[in-house]
Structures are given as C-alpha cells and as structure tokens.
Amino acid sequence: MATHSILEQTKKDNVKFVLLQFTDIYGIVKSLTIPVEALADSLEHGSWFDGSSIEGFMRIAESDMYLKPDQATYAIIPWLKSEDGNTCRFICDVFKPDGTAFEGDPRFILKKAIKEAELMGYTYNTGPELEFFLFRKADGHEPLAHDRGGYFDLITDDAYEIRRDMTLALQSFGIEVEASHHEVAIGQHEIDFKYNNALTTADNATTLRYTIKAIAQKHGLHATFMPKPIAGQNGSGMHVHQSLFHDGKNAFYDNNNPYKLSETALQFIAGQLDHIRGMIAVLSPTVNSYKRLVPGYEAPVYISWACTNRSALIRVPRFFKGRSQAARIELRCPDPSANVYLAFAAMLTAGLDGIKRKLTPPNPIEENLYHFDGAKLNERKIATLPSTLGEAIAELNKDELIKKALGTHTYERFVEAKSAEWDEFRLQVTQWEWDRYMDSY
C-alpha cells in the first residue's frame, strides 16, 4: 500500500496514535508510540529510538537506531478502540544511522535466511501451533489454573468465551484463525492460524502472543507461553509445520514415495536433524524449556523422524488424497518462548544445508520411542536433545552454520544473555532442595 493510501486509511479509521512494534532478542514485543501526525515522516524517514535499552541490540556508545514501519502490517488494535480515536500498529524493521539494516534485528535475520532460500528457488512456508496457559491470580496467592477442562473439552471448559474473544481480536489483525481448543493440561489452550510464508507467519505469531496476553488481561487473567508452568502436567510447545514451494508447487511432494515426500523434503529433514542439537538453544531458549523436553509428556527428545509417531522429533502429518500442496513436515521440539524470527531462520538454514549437501536422513522410526531403554537407543543409534539450557548453549557454540545464520552480533549477544540466565539458575537454592536435603544431611 502506498504511503498516501496508508495515511488516508488512518483518517478513515480515526487513528490518533501509532504503535511502532519490533522484537528484542528474546522475541518480546517492544513499541514506540507516536501521534498519527508524525506517521508520514516515520514512513519516509523512520523514527529514532535508543537501541542500547533493548536486550541484544546496541551498546551505550552506539545506541542511535531508527524504525521503518512495514506498511503491509498496518492494523487497528481492537482492544484500544475509543470514541476519542483509535490506535494502529505497524511491525517495523530496524536500521542503523547510516541507513543500513541492523544485523541484530531478528526480523532482518529471518529475511536473510529467506533470501538464501529464494536464491535456491524456494519459498519457505510455516505454520506454528502455539500452546499457552491461562491463570487466574488470587490476591496474594500463586496463580491458579483457570479451568478443569481436558483435550478438546467444551462442557467443562470455562475459557471458551475467552478464546472466542481472542479469535475475534486476531481476525481484526487479518490473521486467519483455523481452530481453537482446550489442550491436554488444566488451563492449557491452543489457537491455530493458517500457514503462510515464513516472514508473514513470524509476524502473525508475534502478534498472536501479544494479542492473547492483552485479551487475557481484559478478562482478569494471565496468559503465559512459559513452556512448563505446572510440574507434572504437559508443557506448552510450538510445533512448526514446514514446506518449501518452487514455482507455486510444493517441493516436498512426491507421489512415488511411501511417505509422499520428495528427495528435497528428505534432504531438508536430514539437515534439520543434523543441526538440531546446535539450534535447540534458539528453538527452546529458556531454563524452563528443558523441563518440558523430557520423556512422557508428548515432548520429543529423541532425534528421529516418522509419519504417525508423535514421539519423533520430526513428524510427517497425513494429508488427504489430491491435496499435494499440503505435504509438509512438523518439527515438534520448539516451544513458544522462542523468538519466532530467530527460530524460523535457524530451521530454514539447517534444512537448506541438508539440500545443499544432499544429506540422507536415517530410517524413520514408527515405534514409541518412550518405550526404548538406553540399550535400545544405543543399538538404533538414536541421539537425544540436550537436557539443560547449559548443554544447549554448548552445542550452539559448536555449530558454525547456526552461528552464521544468527550473525556474529546476535550469536554473541544471545549466548551472553543465555549463559547469564543459566548461571543465575544454577546458583539458586530451591525449595525442592530444602525439602529433600535439609533433614537428611
């Protein structure tokens, strides 16, 4: 949309304020608010901000940066509508004072990976499934689970109306919601939206997290994408469906293959499996992530692939006959605490590496991997994901491809921030340790 058209649209929409949004290295949405009168200048020249205040961005001595709104992301924020005037948002790209793209902008990092795919003739499509929990906070107490519903429950699911409001809000952003339902754990939910090219999908996933939190707050609740908020219950994942398209056709489809997957798809799978240990710190980036990645809670920990087997790290979902465009693979280890832009960039880079090197994946395993003991895992040469954030950081440090995908700036800042997080956690003395050891030693 041309600048003139955008400005005319803001008048029609009675916009008074504009939120310029971007994400930090963690994927947390940040925003700068400007009056609508300043929008024309922002669209042409950008809006300046202090990059040294944003996690993973610039140092104090080199803090000046500016935002350029992506006009395709214009939307009215539904919960900020007012008779006095509305508020719109744009997702922005981040630039340095010399006019070059900021290499540490997560959106730019994904764009770089997408460009590499385009040079190879591919469009990268993704469809993430972000799970989340809703909690009610009682005065002076820990958060309590909001409902007692189970997987796909309706009768006992008190959050139906809340998910409905969330869906309506997402639709107002132009996000095509395909389904919403209660998940397995108490207080756990999922809202799925239609797949798209990776950049649009990352924008939509970031908007979804922001929207779900805002609508939950309107209902007096707290929404969290923390991977494992309740011990002993299923955690929240972000399963990501992926495919490559070439000249408008699904490059992952081959009718002659038993799995209906092309050689390109198999090489892509092989690349992701080859780099999964190196990129897991990006896909599952918190201390808490590794309390979800344990056997027994539908969270994959074994590096393998299969068709129907949900204990596999990469699953090949079934699709209806005649729907070749739906051929895809599903990576099941990411969680919704990840910066979606960085996660997609790492995943795409790893998959493309498999294509470039013509890698062959191991044989698929359709058995329940959670029933394998250590001896059988060793016999079948099935490796596992790192079990802690500390191990994941060590693996990232060894993977030159994923480091290159992140870029030197973001890789160094990311490892610095996550190492500090891991060290801080290691130094804590928990209630569990008191209960376990205080009277025994």
Image (spheres, grey):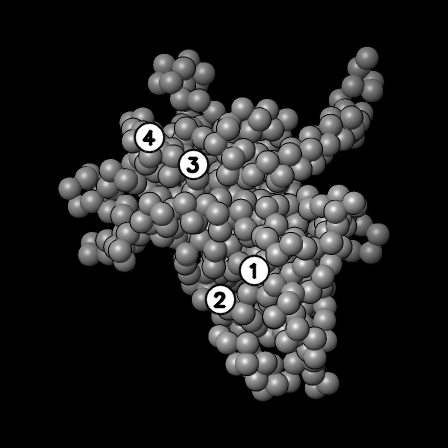
Coordinates of residue 84 in the picture (x, y in percent): 73, 85
The residue tagged 1 is: 208
Q: Do the residues labelled 2 and 1 touch (CB within 8 Å)?
A: yes
- Above/below status of 326 relative to 374: below
Q: What residue type is labelled 3?
A: Ala
Q: Earlier in the sequence, mark 2 or mark 4?
A: 2
The tag earlier along the polypeptide, 1 or 3, is 1
- Residue type beneath disc 1: Leu
Q: Position of residue 251 (x, y in %)?
A: 27, 48
Left or right of residue 415: residue 374: left
Front one among 431 and 57: 57
Q: Say whether disc 1 or disc 4 marks the residue closer to the N-terminus.
A: 1
Where residue 399 appears, as percent x and y from the top left, is 51, 27
Q: Residues within 10 Å of mark 2 (few under 14, many from 20)?
A: many
Disc 1 to disc 4, C-alpha distance: 36 Å
Q: Residue 175 carries which label?
A: 2
Q: Residue at x 46, y 45 (%)?
A: 113
Tag 3 or tag 4, which sits nearer the N-term?
3
Amino acid type, label 2: Ile
Q: How many marks?
A: 4
Can you give x and y, in whole percent of width and height, for residue 188 in the image? 57, 51
- How many angstroms separate mark 2 from mark 3 (CA)? 28 Å
Report which residue position mark 4 lands on. 357
Q: Quick one: quadrant of the C terminus?
A: top right
Q: Please, what secondary structure does the residue beneath circle 2 have? A: loop
Question: In the rendered image of this protein, does residue 406 appear above or below residue 6?
Answer: above
Under circle 1, the secondary element is helix
Q: Which residue is at a point 66% across and 50% down the rendered structure image?
A: 24
* 69 to the left or right of 316: right
Task: Give the spatial CA distance, label 1 vs label 3.
Answer: 26 Å
Residue at label 3?
Answer: 350
Q: Determine the residue located farthest toward the front in the rendered image.
A: 98
